[in-house]
Amino acid sequence: MKTLLTLTGIAGLVLTCPASAFDKIEDHNKRFVEAGSVLTEIMQTPEKGIPQDLLAKAHCVAIVPGLKRVGFIVGAKYGKGVLTCRTTNGWSAPSTIRIEGGSIGFQIGAGETDLVLLVMNERGKEKLLDDKFTVGGDASVMGGPVGRSATAGTDAQMHAEMLSYSRARGVFAGVSLEGATLRPDTDDNHDIYGPNARQSEIVKGAYKPTSSASALLAKLNSYSPVEQK
């Protein structure tokens, strides 16, 4: 009887492991697809979205769909998203990221927010690729201008290393992310690209994107193409 139970337990473990791995990949694929959907929806409303000329200048783009937020004036947040950067051969495969802590401007109650972060220069990119990046502490981050053109942005916005945006209940606006931390989701990157994958290598083009990331990269290329070499 003990032997039978042991064999049954081993068989159950063998059967559940592939399902668990499959569920993980499905979660990662869903994150890529949702990030592409967020960018598509934002860029389809040019009067209220990210100015296309700013997106065209961005060195990297981070998107966090459905960022969880809760609090009264000062709140907490947690979310998982993706980061892709320009390479000499096009936009990179997306690295998976996490954002935690801090507050999102002035807020009351709980909800979800779609977050987009544009990295506007190489210094900002280098800071973002650190193992743990603190928004506002490690680089200048400001709420970005909204609308068809960036001409309405302030001089400070135009010289910020990063520009941040959020969308909640259909309203899209620049947003403060002071105090939040952003870091690579290393475990998820390993699930997707292999045990040796590092974010710095992923966004420099060392890994091929998965098919689930195709919609996101296609949308970026349509609004902000990279010259192929």
Image (cartoon, helix red, strand yellow):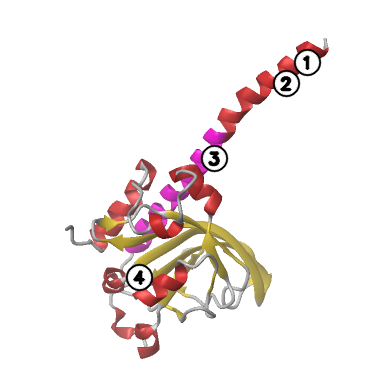
Helix, strand or loop at mark 1: helix
The answer to whether the residue labelled 2 contacts the one labelled 1, judged by CB atoms less than 8 Å apart, is yes
Could you tell me residue 3's position as x and y percent?
Answer: 78, 12
What crowding class fits label 1: few (fewer than 14 Cα within 10 Å), some (14-19), or many (20 or more)? few
Which residue is at the front of the view, 71 or 14?
14
Quarter of the image for the N terminus: give it.
top right
Residue depicted at 36% across the width and 52% down the height: 93
The answer to whether the residue labelled 3 contacts the one labelled 2, judged by CB atoms less than 8 Å apart, is no
| Residue wearing tag 1 | 5
Quarter of the image for the C terminus: give it.
bottom left
Residue depicted at 38% across the width and 64% down the height: 61
Amino acid found under the numbered disc labelled 4: Ile
Q: Earlier in the sequence, mark 3 or mark 1?
A: 1
Helix, strand or loop at mark 4: loop
Quarter where residue 143 is shown: bottom left
Which residue is at the front of the view, 152 or 220?
220
Q: Is residue 187 above or below residue 120?
A: above
Residue depicted at 49% across the width and 39% down the height: 26
Quote the CA–CA distance across marks 2 and 4. 53 Å
Q: Does residue 109 appear in this view?
A: no
The reply, left or right, for residue 8 in relation to residue 82 is right
Say which of marks 4 and 1 sits in front.
Answer: 1
Amino acid found under the numbered disc labelled 2: Gly
| Residue wearing tag 2 | 9
Q: Earlier in the sequence, mark 3 or mark 2?
A: 2
Q: Which residues are magenta?
A: 21-44
Quote the CA–CA distance across marks 3 and 1. 28 Å
